[in-house]
């Protein structure tokens, strides 16, 4: 029985003050459930509406690629500078301390390696995403791959259904196969298809005409960094993407293959969250690198 001692009647009803309508700060996400919004707000900073996700899921296809040979030595020390960590479950469980307190975007499909063409990917059981307390799960979609397009879209669909049941947002990741043209027509098509099929976040690549890709995608887009570039070019890429409507980056190699990964991720964050110009961010990178 609840303690009934000194029960006080409420008196502060704010009479005359209308309740303010709440509007969620991420595009296309107003009508999502509370749990999905809560998770999204761990990934996208509420003060800027943007995110710097650190992608190190490459090993699930590539094995111990350069910079990811030892996650404990390369990623764990820089995790504090990321808004979100994107990785596969085996790496999270074996290498990421559970008290890191960073939201996880869980790589949730598998079935392909660099040794073969795109394969028959399967998706992870949503229960494992729940066990890992994932804030999002990512599924690749191979639009334009005649063998795998339908299978990967079905994977996204299945994962969105499962994620919706438990309030976990799903990120659609647009693949770039050998025969897929890297232009705004292709990325616009693939990104829009991810959103139409229920993705709450889309990960794609920056390209000429990127503003059309972001304009026609009703949910936030983050860009992959792609192959390692000189630092200034990678910062220009992030800056151009943000200026053209991206809600952040999900960058891997341009951070962990940099000579100074901690300096690089902080420079990228300064571009994404503070709007630093690429040259200013490069100066920051040099300062941090030489500190
Ligand atoms: C591939 C991915 C990778 O995480 C992605 O490519 C990000 O890494 P990078 O910035 O190195 O390209 O999602 O499907």
Image (spheres, rainbow, N blue to C red):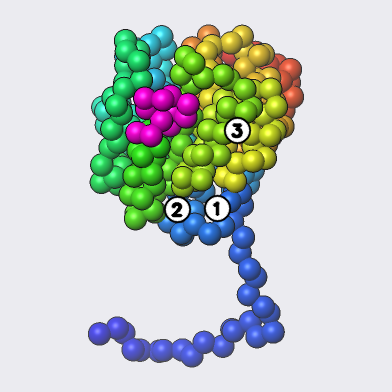
Whether residues under marks 1 and 2 lie with C-beta atoms below 8 angstroms apart, the answer is yes
Q: Residue at x 57, y 45 (%)?
A: 219
Q: Earlier in the sequence, mark 1 or mark 2?
A: 1
Image coords of residue 281 (percent x, y): 69, 21
Residue for badge 1: 29
Circle 2 residues within 10 Å: few <14, some 14–19, many ≥20: many
Image height of 70 relative to 42, above or below: above
Per the image, label 2 sits on a secondary structure element best described as: helix
Q: Residue at x 32, y 16 (%)?
A: 113
State the separation of the CA atoms marked 1 and 2. 9 Å
Nearer to me, 234 or 123: 123
Per the image, label 1 sits on a secondary structure element best described as: loop
Q: Nearer the viewer, mark 3 or mark 2?
A: 3
Nearer to me, 174 or 221: 174
Q: Residue at x 32, y 10 (%)?
A: 115
Residue 149: say if magenta. yes
Q: Quadrant of the C terminus?
A: top right
Image coords of residue 166 (percent x, y): 34, 54
Residue for badge 3: 188
Circle 3 residues within 10 Å: few <14, some 14–19, many ≥20: many
Nearer to me, 78 or 19: 19
- State which region is magenta: 141-151
Q: Quadrant of the N terminus?
A: bottom left
Which numbered tag is attached to residue 230?
Answer: none
Location of residue 244 by image quarter: top right
- Does the beta carbon of the residue at mark 2 sit less than 8 Å from ligand 1? no
State the separation of the CA atoms marked 1 and 3. 19 Å
Residue for badge 2: 36
Circle 1 residues within 10 Å: few <14, some 14–19, many ≥20: some
């Amino acid at each position: 029985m609840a303690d009934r001692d000194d029960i006080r009647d409420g008196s502060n009803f704010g009479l005359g003050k209308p309740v303010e309508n709440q509007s969620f700060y991420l595009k296309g996400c107003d009508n999502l459930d509370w749990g999905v919004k809560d998770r999204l707000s761990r990934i996208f900073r509420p003060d800027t509406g943007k995110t710097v996700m650190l992608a190190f899921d490459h090993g699930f296809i590539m094995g111990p690629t350069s910079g990811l040979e030892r996650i404990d030595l390369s990623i764990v020390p820089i995790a504090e500078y990321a808004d979100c960590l994107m990785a596969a479950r085996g790496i999270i469980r074996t290498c990421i301390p559970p008290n890191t307190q960073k939201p996880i975007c869980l790589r949730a499909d598998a079935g392909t390696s660099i040794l073969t063409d795109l394969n028959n990917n399967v998706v992870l059981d949503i229960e494992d995403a729940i066990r890992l307390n994932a804030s999002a799960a990512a599924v690749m979609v191979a639009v334009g791959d005649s063998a795998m397009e339908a299978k990967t879209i079905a994977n996204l669909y299945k994962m969105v259904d499962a994620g919706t049941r438990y309030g976990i947002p799903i990120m659609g990741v647009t693949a770039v196969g050998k025969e897929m043209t890297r232009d705004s027509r292709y990325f616009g098509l693939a990104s829009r298809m991810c959103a139409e099929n229920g993705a709450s976040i889309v990960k794609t690549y920056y390209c000429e005409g990127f503003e059309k890709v972001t304009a026609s995608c009703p949910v936030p887009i983050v860009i992959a960094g792609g192959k390692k570039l000189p630092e200034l070019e990678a910062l220009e890429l992030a800056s151009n993407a943000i200026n053209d409507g991206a809600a952040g980056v999900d960058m891997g190699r341009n951070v962990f293959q940099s000579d100074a990964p901690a300096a690089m991720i902080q420079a990228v964050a300064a571009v994404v969250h503070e709007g630093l110009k690429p040259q200013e961010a490069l100066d920051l990178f040099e300062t941090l690198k030489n500190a």
